[in-house]
Image (cartoon, rainbow, N blue to C red):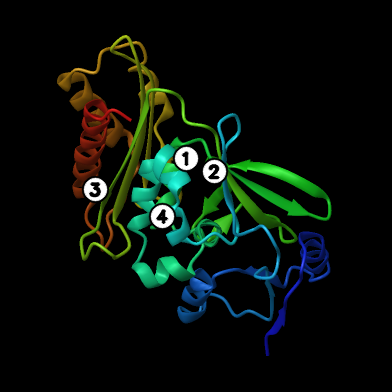
Amino acid sequence: MVDLQFPSSLDETCELMSSSSGEGRIIAGGVALMILIHHQLYFPTRLISIKRIPDLDQIRFDKGKGLSIGALVTHHQVESSPLVLKNYPALAECIHHVGNLRVRNMGTLMGDLCQADNHSDPTPLLGVLGASVRARSIRGERIIPIEQFHRGIYETDLKEDEIATEITIPPPHPGTRTRYLRFSGNSPIDWPSLVVAGSLTLEDGQCRELRISVGCLTEIPVSLKQQAETLKGKSLTPSKVKKFAQSCASEMDLTSDTQGSAWYKKRLVEVYIRRTVEQLLRSKG
């Protein structure tokens, strides 16, 4: 039998998590949790619902601080938010591809991240946006960068007694373009087989900063920081972009499985990285 509790504040939630001896699990929309239960990967005994906690369903934006997305904000709220559409259009586009409308109306973005499925859409893009997760416990709060949040498949950096309360994204840099591309071998609403997210800042026609993150092919997204550094201060000509994509793909450690051979995956990564940079160059924001 499952013990289901409904705290009315974050302080009460933290106390319940602390006293649960590692058995307590947070539930928001419940979509990710139901997937784990359906596949018999998790058998809950104590669930702590945060549905009654005020303000966790809010999206806020400040020009100086950036965007904050509460733990109860659904995917559909994110994709349809005027604040997100205006300031982070690539994020709205990315979230629009998560499942179908029924899933996006129920599931939360934070729940998606905490499930830590390596075939999830948002994580690579949140990585290039510089996002972080705010975690809270009776010991206090801490900020976890997205690139450190996922430790493996279904494994995050959250401690047993912590609750993830908020996603924060810094304000967009003027002139920075952001793009997100996905590939799914089955249908447009299926889990992606590959996700490539990128952001580009140009200065006097040259690359000031390029960020590329590749998801789905490994346990956690691959951030290609070192490879992108080689393009800093250079004009991104077609030949340089092609060579960059080839170099990134060749250095990725991929294995053959039911999704395809390692050779096939490398070719796919190369094509999608090249397309991502080409779209960044053509876009205006």
Residue occupied by mark 4 = 80
Q: Are marks 4 and 3 in contact (CB under 8 Å)?
A: no
Q: Identify the amino acid type marked 4.
A: Ser
Nearer to us of marks 4 and 3 is 4
Q: What element carries label 3?
A: helix
**Disc 3 residue type (three-letter):** Lys
Answer yes or no: do the residues labelled 1 and 2 have beta carbons within 8 Å? yes
Mark 3 or mark 2, which is nearer the start of the sequence? Answer: 2
Percent of width and height locating residue 257: 28, 60
Gap between marks 1 and 2 measured at Cα: 6 Å
Q: Is the C-beta separation of discs 4 and 1 under 8 Å?
A: no
Using the image as rendered, state which of residue 226 and residue 253 is in the foreground.
Answer: 226
State the CA–CA distance, disc 4 to disc 3: 33 Å
**Which residue lies under the disc numbered 2?**
146
Of the two numbered discs 4 and 3 on the same chain, state the one appearing first in sequence: 4
Residue pointed to by mark 1: 127
Nearer to us: label 2 or label 3: 2
Q: Is residue 221 visible?
A: no
**Cα distance in 3D space between marks 2 and 4:** 23 Å
**Foreground: 257 or 230?**
230
Kind of residue at disc 1:
Gly
Instruction: Give, as a three-letter code, the residue at label 2.
Output: Ile
Q: Which residue lies under the disc numbered 3?
A: 265
Give the x, y percent position of residue 79: 40, 54
Q: What element carries label 2?
A: helix
**C-alpha gap between disc 3 and disc 1:** 21 Å
Measured in 3D between alpha carbons, the distance from the residue under mark 4 to the one under mark 1, in whole angstroms, is 21 Å
Left or right of residue 148, residue 213 in this image? left
Q: Nearer the viewer, residue 23 or 254?
A: 23
* SS under mark 1: helix
